Amino acid sequence: MQNEGGRKRLIVLGIAAALLLTAAGALLYISSHYHVKYIYVEGNVHYTNEEIIALVTSEKLGDNSLYLSLKYKNKGIKGIPFIEKMDVKVVAPDTIRIVVYEKAVAGYVEYLDKYMYFDKDGTVVEASDTKTEGIPQVTGINFNHVVLYEPLPVENQEVFKEILYMTQILSKYEISADKIYFDDAYEMTLYFGDVRAKLGNDDNVEEKIARLKQILPAAEGKKGVFRMENYAGSGSNVSFEQDK
């Protein structure tokens, strides 16, 4: 009986040793075979490729493609402004593709020395010390407090639909406004450095922006305002009033 018990222990130990050797071999294979050499990045706007790569690969096992694909499988990202989630896909054992999903930002307001970025619904998605190029500041809308991840408490929530539509049209015509100002009647004025475009109400908005695309270069180096309140489309004149 003792011999039989000893044989069983030897068998168990042999199986355990075989499993350990198999696991060690598998780890060695994964470590050497899935070593990252090539990285592609897509979907990033606010961060460079190099910044995204450093973010993903800087931690332990950051050079292993299989590990990264498991770690960043539709992973939500916290603490990194403007990034909602990232996904790492293994293209080949030595090649990965990092897909960045950024938060959709329509504009920002300044509050308590912070840049408060909000989405298409007016929900504040980021509070940052850094102003990001390409995102317009929105002024003229009144609020008395700002809470992260909650809508801006403005009287007319429909204003966010106008902001979203305007940013989409500006993007379509490859125009970047520094600021969108709303007056008491919720009529818009766009700011481009020292040049402004007073659009008036929301009639013929796309026609106004298409025309602005044509005439904006002529105002380079000047200070003044394009009067587009009554612009009705092709054939209409747009006056430029220089600041005195």
Image (tube, helix red, strand yellow):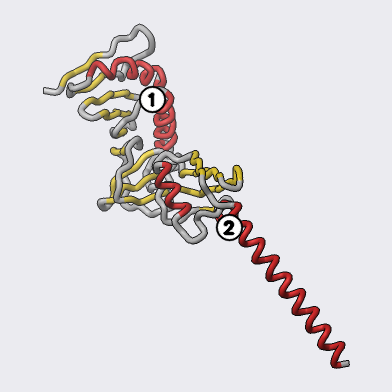
| Residue 42 at x, y percent in the picture | 49, 39
Task: Give the CA separation, mark 2 to mark 1.
Answer: 46 Å
The answer to whether residue 17 of the structure is visible from this angle is yes
At x 29%, y 15%, the residue is: 215
Judging from the image, what secondary structure is the residue with disc 1 in?
Answer: loop
Q: Determine whether, in the image, residue 140 is placed left or right of residue 74.
A: left
| Location of residue 232 with respect to 49 vertically, above or below | above
Instruction: Please report contact status of discs 2 and 1: CB closer than 8 Å, yes or no.
Output: no
Q: What residue type is labelled 1?
A: Glu
Q: Where is residue 92 in the image (x, y as percent from the top left)?
A: 61, 44
Q: Earlier in the sequence, mark 2 or mark 1?
A: 2
Pointer 1 local density, CA inside 10 Å: few below 14, some 14–19, many at least 20: few
Image: 214 above or below 156: above
**In percent of the image, x 50 and y 43: which residue is there?**
39
Q: Which residue bears the numbered disc 1?
A: 174
Where does label 2 land, which residue? Answer: 31
Say which element carries label 2.
helix
